[in-house]
Image: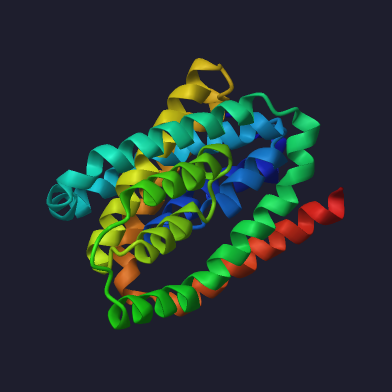
């Protein structure tokens, strides 16, 4: 990587490190790493594709932590996995066919939408858990759940920030009440949707590898340290910080446009 770009290049290294840490603790790492790629001159579509590829290995590694819960959900893996593949592929294909100027005009709105998702995640999740406890669902409505996952994974394949919260809300609404089961399925679905998006972006030759490989390493280091530090951090403070970062990045891109 050419560090002659000054602080933009140095910030990309720092942002990918912090993004890996944030994703390990609360999510929202793309609020830092995606704008950092734009700042070093990567085109908007390529920046989003490169960011997805760079952060995916760390996301995939989190499956290990939920392996036992994922095995307990064998019956759901095929239907939710197929929905994730279809939605993620469609979203990634749409991104590759979006004009650079059009996507750049959408960036502040996408960041704002994702920041609001993070802001709503805690109160909505609490409400959903209360509703699930008070009104247990006798039967999982698989067909509408499948369609909902396709829709959410379409967003994940296209942009993705905040998609994990959407999935958790969807799974809870459709009768999956155990939080460990919800988290395990969320990790499996997001990894699958982003995985097919990664393959699509690589096949479409839209990855800036000179940045991507370095980001993979620094994000992995940040994720490793973030996972170890997560127990010592105040989760509410971390989530508020993620929301403020997202809102700040959104405001910045509204301003420069």
Q: Nearer the viewer, residue 71 or 21?
A: 71
Q: 133 above or below 18?
A: below
For the question of whether residue 59 can be seen, the reply is no
Residue appearing at x 55%, y 72% in the figure: 120
Left or right of 230 on screen, residue 240: right
Q: Quadrant of residue 83?
A: top left
Q: Position of residue 73 (x, y in %)?
A: 18, 50
Quadrant for the N terminus, please: top right
| Protein image colouring | rainbow
For the question of whether residue 86 can be seen, the reply is yes
Residue appearing at x 27%, y 58% in the figure: 140
Q: Position of residue 51 (x, y in %)?
A: 54, 38
Q: Nearer the viewer, residue 197 or 228?
A: 197
Q: 121 above or below 141?
A: below
Q: 23 above or below 37?
A: below
Q: Position of residue 63 (x, y in %)?
A: 25, 47
Q: Position of residue 171 (x, y in %)?
A: 36, 59
Residue appearing at x 71%, y 30% in the figure: 43
Exactly how many numbered labels are in the figure?
0
Q: 47 above or below 239?
A: above
Q: Nearer the viewer, residue 59 or 169?
A: 169
Residue appearing at x 29%, y 52% in the figure: 185
Q: Nearer the viewer, residue 2 or 135?
A: 135
Left or right of 151 on screen, residue 140: left
Left or right of 229 on screen, residue 71: left
């Amino acid at each position: 990587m050419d560090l002659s770009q000054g602080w933009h290049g140095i910030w990309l290294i720092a942002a990918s490190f912090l993004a890996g840490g944030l994703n390990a603790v609360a999510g929202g790492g793309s609020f830092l790493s995606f704008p950092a790629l734009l700042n070093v001159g990567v085109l908007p579509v390529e920046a989003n594709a490169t960011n997805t590829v760079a952060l995916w290995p760390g996301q995939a590694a989190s499956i290990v932590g939920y392996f036992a819960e994922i095995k307990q959900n064998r019956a759901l893996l095929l239907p939710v996995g197929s929905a994730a593949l279809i939605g993620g592929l469609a979203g990634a294909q749409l991104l590759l066919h979006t004009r650079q100027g059009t996507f750049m005009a959408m960036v502040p709105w996408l960041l704002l939408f994702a920041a609001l998702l993070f802001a709503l995640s805690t109160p909505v999740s609490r409400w959903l858990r209360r509703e699930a406890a008070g009104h247990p669902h006798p039967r999982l409505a698989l067909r509408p759940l499948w369609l909902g996952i396709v829709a959410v994974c379409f967003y994940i394949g296209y942009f993705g920030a905040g998609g994990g919260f959407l999935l958790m809300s969807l799974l809870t609404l459709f009768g999956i009440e155990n939080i460990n089961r919800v988290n395990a399925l969320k990790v499996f679905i997001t990894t699958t949707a982003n995985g097919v998006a990664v393959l699509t972006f690589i096949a479409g030759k839209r990855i800036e590898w000179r940045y991507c490989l370095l980001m993979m390493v620094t994000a992995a280091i940040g994720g490793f340290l973030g996972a170890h530090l997560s127990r010592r951090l105040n989760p509410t403070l971390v989530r508020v910080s993620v929301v403020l970062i997202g809102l700040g990045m959104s405001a910045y891109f509204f301003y420069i446009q």
